[in-house]
């Protein structure tokens, strides 16, 4: 792939504001610093000037942080800025992450005005004890109310669910999954709690105040997610993502296809097919550097063609559709089997993958242990 020949048609914008920092979260964000929203928007407008000509975009994803925390007026200002440089075509998917507490009638109405088509609701659970254990600032009824308002407005809705929360039982996860399906959302993302350095949860775990779920329980929760959601009509189209017919997230599919994408805001990454540039993760540093005309890149990951092809194997196999050998060769110039013959042979022998004709896929067992497989491919 020649990176310069394929302008990105996908854009991510990072909105780094939350009302409250959840104890497990290490994302790029400022909690309780709404006084900086104006400066952030000014810096975002300046960063967007990197794009010389308005960019035709098929998918736009506003993540964070909590984009909905900007409220109706803030979202109008944000989209006013984005629309100066990003041209959203008819049929574009425009997603935004939302906290259930922010979903009011005024916000839903504004989502329609600015052209949002999809909302990813950070619900995490529909169980009061689990939400408390996760240090969330909303209760189960807030999630139900928000989902039903968004669905009634004709938006596509994703619900994020978390498993392996402190003290969470398998029965609680099963109840969450059934409740999520009964809400009628189009898409459910299920993630296992991770214990990140520097978070309040990780400090509490080290002190012995919180306990991480054991691996067998984590696995049983993941199996429950696959069984319950597939039983309710959701297809597991990627390891952590489940969608009803027509409900897949097109923006994430662009990432997994390794298509080029743009990224704006603190900690946001952009990718041209080989090089991934990630903006400085500190919101205040990113703002200072953008506004004073200095370099605001935090990390530059320049991959060789072979590195990029190996990464494509990983994101391809995380998907239910797997990898098509011919399409892979056409996209990368490499044969999958030349890069990963030994790993594939072992996985197929162990029942973790199937290889039939041109198509390589992980099995259910392979999906369950996928994170432990990738080092074999990326090692080179
Ligand atoms: S609402 Fe989301 S982004 Fe904000 S602190 Fe909690 S987990 Fe992190």
Image (cartoon, rainbow, N blue to C red):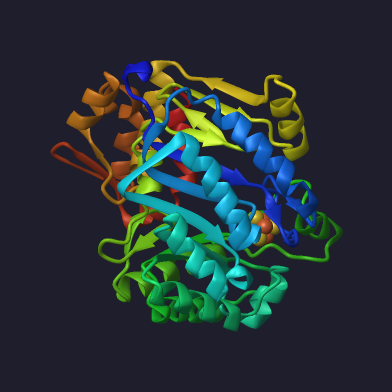
Q: Is residue 12 above or below residue 219?
A: above
Can you name the residue that lies furthest to the right here?
Answer: 207
**Quarter containing ligand 1?**
bottom right
Can you name the residue that lies furthest to the left here?
Answer: 357
Q: Is residue 6 above or below residue 214?
A: above
> Which residue is drawn at the image coordinates 43% and 63% (left, top)?
112
Q: Position of residue 326 (x, y in %)?
A: 17, 29
Q: Nearer the viewer, residue 32 or 231?
A: 32
Q: Nearer the viewer, residue 337 or 108?
A: 108
> Which residue is drawn at the image coordinates 82% and 60% (left, top)?
204
Give the number of marks. 0
Horizontal side of 342 relative to 44 (left or right) equals left
Can the viewer see residue 189 in this picture? no
Horizontal side of 104 relative to 116 (left or right) equals right
Q: Nearer the viewer, residue 303 or 63?
A: 63
Q: Quadrant of residue 273?
A: top left
Q: Quadrant of residue 259?
A: top left
Can the viewer see residue 133 in this picture? yes
Quadrant including the N terminus: top left
> Which residue is drawn at the image coordinates 56% and 80% (left, top)?
172
Horizontal side of 239 relative to 293 (left or right) equals left
> Which residue is drawn at the image coordinates 76% and 59% (left, top)?
201
Q: Nearer the viewer, residue 170 or 18?
A: 18
Q: Quadrant of residue 72?
A: bottom right
């Amino acid at each position: 792939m020649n990176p310069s020949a394929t302008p990105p048609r996908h854009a991510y914008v990072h909105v780094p504001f939350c009302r409250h920092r959840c104890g497990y979260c290490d994302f790029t964000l400022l909690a309780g610093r709404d006084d900086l929203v104006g400066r952030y928007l000014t810096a975002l407008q300046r960063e967007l000037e990197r794009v010389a000509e308005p960019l035709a975009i098929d998918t736009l994803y506003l993540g964070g942080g909590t984009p909905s925390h900007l409220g109706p007026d803030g979202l109008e200002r944000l989209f006013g800025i984005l629309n100066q440089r990003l041209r959203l075509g008819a049929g574009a998917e425009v997603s935004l992450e939302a906290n259930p507490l922010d979903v009011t009638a005024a916000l839903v109405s504004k989502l329609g005005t600015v052209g949002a088509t999809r909302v990813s609701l950070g619900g995490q659970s529909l169980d009061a004890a689990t939400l408390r254990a996760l240090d969330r600032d909303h209760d189960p009824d807030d999630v139900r109310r928000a989902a039903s308002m968004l669905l009634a407005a004709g938006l596509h809705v994703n619900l994020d669910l978390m498993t392996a929360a402190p003290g969470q039982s398998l029965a609680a996860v099963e109840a969450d999954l059934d409740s999520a399906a009964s809400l009628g959302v189009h898409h459910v993302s299920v993630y296992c709690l991770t214990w990140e350095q520097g978070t309040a949860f990780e400090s509490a775990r080290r002190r012995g105040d919180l306990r991480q779920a054991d691996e067998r329980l984590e696995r049983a929760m993941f199996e429950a997610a696959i069984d319950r959601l597939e039983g309710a009509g959701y297809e597991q189209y990627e390891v952590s993502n489940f969608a009803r017919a027509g409900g897949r997230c097109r923006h994430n599919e662009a990432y997994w296809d390794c298509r080029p994408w743009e990224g704006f805001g603190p900690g946001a990454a952009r990718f041209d097919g080989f090089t991934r540039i990630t903006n400085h993760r500190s919101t205040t540093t990113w703002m200072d550097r953008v506004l004073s005309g200095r370099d605001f890149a935090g990390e530059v990951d320049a991959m060789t063609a072979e590195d990029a092809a190996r990464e494509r194997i990983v994101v391809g196999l995380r998907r239910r559709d797997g990898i098509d050998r011919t399409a892979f060769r056409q996209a990368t110039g490499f044969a999958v089997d030349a890069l990963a013959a030994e790993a594939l042979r072992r996985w197929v022998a162990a029942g973790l993958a199937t290889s039939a004709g041109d198509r390589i896929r992980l099995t259910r067992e392979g999906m369950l242990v996928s994170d432990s497989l990738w080092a074999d491919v990326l090692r080179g």
